[in-house]
Image (cartoon, rainbow, N blue to C red):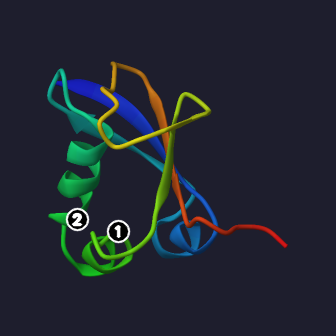
Amino acid sequence: MMKLRVRYFASLREAFGAEETVEMPAGATLGELRDALIARGGAYAERLARDRALRCALDQAMADEASPIHADAEVAFFPPVTGG
């Protein structure tokens, strides 16, 4: 298992807080991380649902859900339109 720092922005931050540490199996992808968070149910299932547009970044660079995650990575999730 590897530990990741997961950060949330905009409305996701309001729902989940600013960040948390998550453990995932070695070789996991961003999409698998999203699915693991959705599996928690509740607000995670609602806010991260597959029918919702969501952007993600890996180590502060935009990435797609097929991107593999490494130990101690920083992952960020945010709605496609933030700020104002």
Q: Residue at x 34, y 31 (%)?
A: 67
Q: Is residue 5 left or right of residue 18?
A: left
Name the mark on residue 34.
none
In 3D space, how far apart are the residues under numbered discs 2 and 1 (Cα atoms)? Answer: 6 Å
Q: Secondary structure at mark 1?
A: loop
- The image shows residue 54 at horizontal and vertical percentages of 46, 63
Q: Which residue is mark 1?
A: 48
Contact check, label 2 and label 1, Cβ < 8 Å: yes
Residue 20: percent from the left, percent from the top?
A: 43, 48
Amino acid at the residue labelled 1 = Leu
Q: Secondary structure at mark 2?
A: helix
Q: Amino acid at mark 2?
A: Ile
The numbered dot on residue 38 is: 2
Above-or-below relation of 27 to 21: above
Q: Quadrant of the N terminus?
A: top left
The percent position of residue 45, horizontal first and vertical second, equals 25, 74
Q: In this rendering, is residue 28 above or below 54? A: above
**Residue at the right extreme?**
84
Looking at the image, which residue is at 32% across and 40% down? 30
Q: Earlier in the sequence, mark 2 or mark 1?
A: 2
In-front residue for pair 33/72: 33
Left or right for 36, reference 47: left
Identify the residue shown where x is 26% and y is 34%.
29
